[in-house]
Image: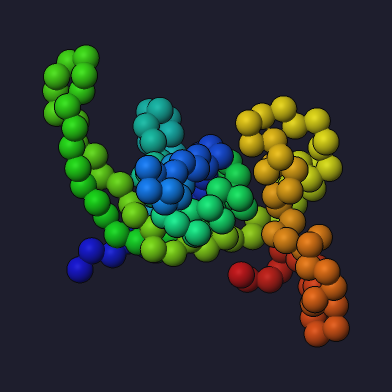
């Protein structure tokens, strides 16, 4: 069975591209901490060795578009998917490079209470000068400003003080 479950933090903002057949594909790298004892982690850090793995994640279709819209560098997320291996020839050296990637079947956006201020600052920043600037201004609210009062009658928002376990 080829199944992968990962929880980690985005290393950088996701990149969204479209294939020639107009299929969306979002890619990002996830920092996934290794399961280490405190002593082993300190030992590796002292040797400047990594205490995390950094798999490349591919998310296709509408889920990929949503990942690009709602995920930022530093956001935590959970990935369910499968491993895919491949290889290519390096143009400069001619050597064969082997790759291992994760093809995501499901992406879960996880809350990160320490970044609420960062998200609010991004939403309030009207001078974003990046190619994704328009998207960055609308991200982070997860559609709350565009719900047209749909949830007002049935639901009330719970303030997250960090005690909620999900």
143 to the left or right of 111? right
Q: Is residue 143 above or below residue 93?
A: below
Outermost residue toward the bottom in this view: 154
Residue 47 lies left or right of residue 97; in this view the side is right
Please tell me which residue is depicted at 43% across the width and 34% down the height of the picture.
45
Residue 70 seen in the figure:
yes
> Residue farthest to the top?
92
Instruction: Work out which quarter of the rendered image holds the C terminus and state it.
Output: bottom right
Residue 157 falls in which quadrant of the image? bottom right
In the figure, residue 56 lies in which quadrant? top left
Counting from the top left corner in percent of width and height, residue 149 is at 85, 73
Q: Position of residue 41 (x, y in %)?
A: 41, 43
Outermost residue to the left: 95
Instruction: Indicate left or right for 64 with 146 as reference.
Output: left
- Residue 36: tell me if it is visible: no
The residue depicted at 83 percent of the width and 69 percent of the height is 148
Coordinates of residue 46 in the picture (x, y in percent): 42, 30
Q: Is residue 59 above or below residue 40?
A: below
- Given residues 115 and 45, the one toward you in this image is 115
Q: Write the residue at 14% across / 19% down.
A: 94
Residue shown at the point (52%, 48%) measured from the top left? 9
Q: Which residue appears farthest toward the front when viewing the image?
A: 21
Q: Quadrant of the N terminus?
A: bottom left
Instruction: Relative to 153, say whether 33 is above or below.
Output: above
Looking at this view, is 147 or 122 the one in front? 147
Q: Nearer the viewer, residue 52 or 6?
A: 6
- Measured from the top left, where is residue 69 in percent x and y? 61, 50
Where, by quadrant of the figure, is residue 104 drawn? bottom left
């Amino acid at each position: 069975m080829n199944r992968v479950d990962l929880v980690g933090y985005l290393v950088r903002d996701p990149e969204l591209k479209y294939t020639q057949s107009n299929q969306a594909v979002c890619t990002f790298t996830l920092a996934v901490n290794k399961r280490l004892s405190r002593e082993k982690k300190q030992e590796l850090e002292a040797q400047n060795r990594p205490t995390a793995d950094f798999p490349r994640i591919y998310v296709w279709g509408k889920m990929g578009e949503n990942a690009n819209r709602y995920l930022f560098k530093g956001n935590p997320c959970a990935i369910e998917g499968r491993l895919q291996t491949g290889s290519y020839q390096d143009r400069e050296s001619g050597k064969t490079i082997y790759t291992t990637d994760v093809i995501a079947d499901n992406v879960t956006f996880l809350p990160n209470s320490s970044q609420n201020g960062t998200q609010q600052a991004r939403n309030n920043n009207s001078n974003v000068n990046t190619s994704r600037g328009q998207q960055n201004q609308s991200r982070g609210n997860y559609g709350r400003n565009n719900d047209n009062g749909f949830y007002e009658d049935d639901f009330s928002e719970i303030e997250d003080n960090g005690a909620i376990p999900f």
